[in-house]
Amino acid sequence: MLARPRVSDTMYGMRGYGITSFFGGPATRAVKSLIIANAAVFVVQLAARLADGNRLVFTFGLIPWRVTHDLALWQPATYMFLHGGFFHIFFNMFTLFMFGCDLERRWGPARFLRYYFLTGIGAALCSWLVGVDSRSVIIGASGAIYGVLLAYGLLYPNRLVYIYLLFPVKVKWLVLFMGAIAFYSSLAGGEPGVAHVAHLGGMLVGWIALRGRGWLAWLQDYRARRRRAALKRQFEVYYGEVRRKIEEEKKGPTIH
């Protein structure tokens, strides 16, 4: 039987970093829909907790053991709509609004949603890969949020974020700092209650999604150049044989 989820099993967002900003603008359609959906699920989660404990979390939260042995393949998608408390969902949704609206305006709702779910599900798969038999319960949208933060840092690297409303920091340095914390914490164990592997996984999947196309194009070009070089060598060998035969025919028979 699965144990009651502990605080250390819950994936939290960016609480504790004191990060704020003066951009975001009016909420865009996809961002607004995600915030409403997460808020609605959170209300259902609170009601379900009063009715039947944590059955909703056990069913729809990400439990790697269940994905491995029970084929609960829906969990890598549903876990990101569950949260561990008010501040957990508040800071996740605040960060989504703050950084996601500009991305949606640039990409459009469809591409933004694809990227959001790609990074969220990718973060879940990273957590599953490093602990296929783990019975820990992982919930929260932080994997996708970290993916959004990474995309913002790549597209708007020099915009300023104000730490505790006082210290201006460029987004690119914020992203680097958050990534370094997630990486170190994933190796060292990190703060209880934070699934740092999922945070790092969201950033990694986001980086591959945004920068991997360049690698793929380079690989395709490299393979095309290799094929052309191989065909050239084959032609040179064949052409050399043909020229040798022609030269021999021109010489005519040798008379002794």
Image: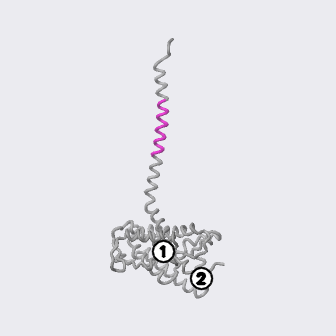
What's the amino acid at mark 1? Ser
Q: Say what secondary structure mark 2 lies in.
A: loop
Query: Would you call the spot at circle 1 few (<14 residues within 10 Å), some (14-19), or many (20 or more)?
Result: many
Mark sitting on residue 54:
2
Query: Would you call the spot at circle 2 few (<14 residues within 10 Å), some (14-19), or many (20 or more)?
Result: some
The image shows residue 133 at horizontal and vertical percentages of 62, 70
Q: Earlier in the sequence, mark 2 or mark 1?
A: 2
Considering depth in this image, is 179 or 32 the residue closer to the camera? Answer: 179
Compared to 183, does 27 lie above or below?
Answer: below
Q: Residue furthest bottom?
A: 50
Instruction: Classify residue 171 by image quadrant.
Output: bottom left
**Residue receiving disc 1:** 142
Mark sitting on residue 48:
none
Please name the residue shown 36% across and 67% down the image: 157
The question of residue 250 being in magenta is answered with no
Compared to 56, does 187 lie above or below?
Answer: above
Please name the residue shown 45% across and 45% down the image: 225
The image shows residue 173 at horizontal and vertical percentages of 37, 69
